[in-house]
Amino acid sequence: MGLATRHDHTTGHTGHAGERLFHHPLVFELAAETLFAGRRREMYLRLAALSGVRPGRRVLDVGCGTGYLSRILAAVAGPEGHVTGVDPSPDMIGRARRQAPANCTYLVGEGQSLELPDESFDVVVSSLTLHHVPQEHRAAVMAEMFRVLRPGGRLLVAEFRPPANPLLARLVNLLAGPALREDTRRMLAELVPQAGFRVEETGELPVALHYVRATRPAV
Ligand SMILES: C[S@@+](CC[C@H](N)C(=O)[O-])C[C@H]1O[C@@H](n2cnc3c(N)ncnc32)[C@H](O)[C@@H]1O
């Protein structure tokens, strides 16, 4: 594709132009609707169910982007619950804030240095984010998710799995750059237990997603 590599001064990340473009809120929204073939909402409702969020829960969404998943989770958590979304991109957070329900708060920040107290969430989720984090920071992101989750709390991490359809796979490569050429299943299989989580279940959703559901062991 020959995309130039460049440094993003808002996030401190270096990436291909296609990867950066994918971080533009409107481009990302359009690309996500396309990649999920019209079934994005259905897939994210299933992620919400897998996360185990219930009314009254305190939820953290790491790499929340435009807030698509956190808005669904906020509806489930209800007025007694709260969802916090964190993302390093001020543009993504700006768009999330403009659509935020009353029980959602959005913060600009990186997953590897969460400015949030220890054990302050019942559920931590992260969707389609870890493959965007430079490899050397991924273990730190997982360690931070472990730190802020209460013992006995649940983690749900979901990643793209490359489409089998070669045309769709090409589209993903064009939009997202090299990040999605990685084996995200292997990445999660290594990172989640290494951080101290107990893996409960791994699985695939029909459109484009692989997930790992885990708990922080109760002490
Ligand atoms: C493909 S988007 C996914 C957004 C959202 N989770 C969703 O499922 O719609 C990936 C997001 O990861 C964010 N991101 C990149 N590096 C990050 C980091 N170090 N910590 C947290 N989020 C990060 C990007 O800014 C981007 O919004």
Image (spheres, rainbow, N blue to C red):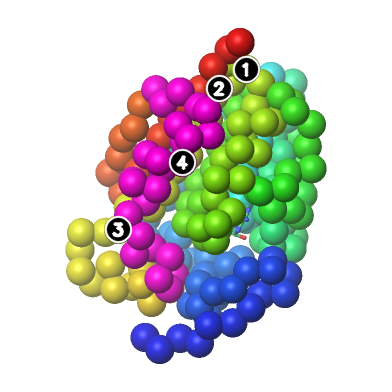
Q: Nearer the viewer, mark 4 or mark 3?
A: 4
Q: How crowded is mark 3: few (under 14 residues within 10 Å), some or many (20 or more)?
A: many
Q: Which residue is disc 2 drawn over?
A: 216
Residue holding disc 3? 162
Percent x, y for residue 125?
Answer: 56, 37
- Mark on residue 2? none
Left or right: residue 100 versus residue 140 is: right
Three-letter residue code for mark 4: Leu
Residue tagged by mark 1? Answer: 151
Residue wearing tag 4: 191
Asked if the residue at tag 1 contacts the one at tag 2, i.e. Cβ–Cβ closer than 8 Å, the answer is yes
Characterize the magenta stretch by its predominant secondary structure: helix
Q: Which residue is drawn at 75% across and 28% down?
A: 118
Residues shaded magenta: 176-200
Say which element carries label 2. Answer: loop
Examine the structure image and report whether residue 182 is included in the region drawn in magenta.
yes
* Circle 2 or circle 4, nearest the eye: 4
In space, the residues marked 2 and 3 are separated at their CA atoms by 28 Å
Q: Label 3's element?
A: loop
Above or below, 79 against 156 in this view is above
